[in-house]
Amino acid sequence: MTGVSRGAPYARFRLPGTRGSIELYREDGLVGLGRRAKPRSLDVIVTSPPYNLGQPYTTYRDRRPRNEYLRWIGDLAAAVDRALSGRGSFFLNVGSPPRDPWLAWDVAREVGKTFVLQNVLHWVKSIAIERRFAGRAAGLGRDVALGHYRPIASSRYVHGAHEYIFHFTRRGDVSIDRLALGVAYQDPSNVHRWRSGRDRLRCRGNTWFLPYATIQRRSRDRPHPASFPPELAEWCIRLHGRLRVRRWADPFVGIGSSAVAAVRTGRPFLGFDIDAAYLAVARDRVRAALERGEGGFSSSSGPGRSRPAAGSTRASAPS
Ligand SMILES: C[S@@+](CC[C@H](N)C(=O)[O-])C[C@H]1O[C@@H](n2cnc3c(N)ncnc32)[C@H](O)[C@@H]1O
């Protein structure tokens, strides 16, 4: 509960074109969800909790006995249960290091005591594609290796280049807007064969390639050991159905990737972190996104006009 504050938000921004706002609190996220949101009032929660891997966060100590950690994840699920609306979505990003592959699933199992696991999405940070598999339509001139991951020195394990985004709902029956993240058919001549071929888009599926932006200096460009890119939260909102989101939250907002997604999607937002230094970065990123005119859905990445991950604050997940 370090840094709990009962007072005003650490930072507050009006969302252009709406009556809503983006509010950042220096507060325990579990407590904050209960204190700042009415019961069943949030339509989406997107978050990435600490993974209990000893990450060097400035304030939080990221190493406790596994049982104690999982009990705390259960407390998080209870806090989300109270705040989430009946048809809401809880998107939980967790990764496992190669040496502890069950970690993410242990977390998912714990949350699964409260919610139904509706979708398992794979956040792919890096992928190598061979030209011959890409097909002629892709126009690749050579094999490519895209994105970044944190390399490990090991003769046993391959690098961890992906994490999970577990999509939990109350009963596993929440409608989602699959074509909001749709991708163009490679061969449009076959489109008429599938009903979902309308608009020449098909469902993206459960692999989301969202690379970290290339950075020059971590302390300046991504001052956090485990952030995700704004696009990850943005895509969760769009998959749930942007216009169905009255208000949403991230109880572990870090340097504000979800808050930037709130600017881009134009949906009112609550973010919490116990660390003032991270919140200062979050505040500056939201301000910069608003100044750049990223507010409003029309400027956001949509099917066929995906925003590159440049400018995202991507940090490598623990591997
Ligand atoms: C995995 S990081 C989230 C990073 C975030 N998604 C981003 O892109 O910047 C977890 C964050 O949880 C914060 N944290 C740890 N315990 C907390 C608590 N009880 N309440 C709120 N924040 C907490 C840490 O300071 C850290 O920034």
Image (spheres, grey):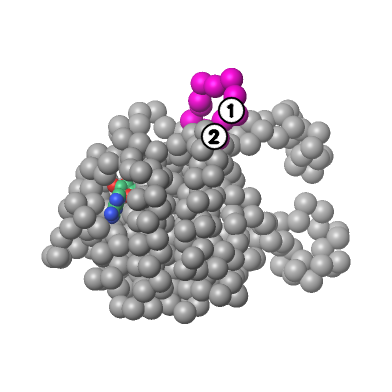
Disc 2/disc 1 C-alpha distance (Å): 6 Å
Q: Amino acid at mark 1?
A: Tyr
Image coords of residue 38 (percent x, y): 30, 78
Q: Amino acid at mark 2?
A: Pro
Relative to the observer, which residue lies in front, 236 or 264?
A: 236
Drawn side of residue 17 relative to residue 126, left or right: left
Q: Which residue is mark 2?
A: 98
Decide: is 283 above or below 201.
above
* Mark 2 or 1, nearer chain start: 2
At 38% from the left and 68% from the top, the residue drawn is 78
Determine crowd level at label 2: few under 14, some 14-19, many 20+ residues with C-alpha closer than 10 A: some
Relative to the observer, which residue lies in front, 117 or 167?
A: 117
Which element type, helix, strand or loop, lies under badge 1? loop
Image coords of residue 308 (percent x, y): 53, 46
Would residue 142 be visible to someone looking at this image? yes
Q: Which residues are magenta?
A: 148-160
Which element type, helix, strand or loop, lies under badge 2? loop
At 30% from the left and 32% from the top, the residue drawn is 219
Image coords of residue 234 (percent x, y): 48, 58
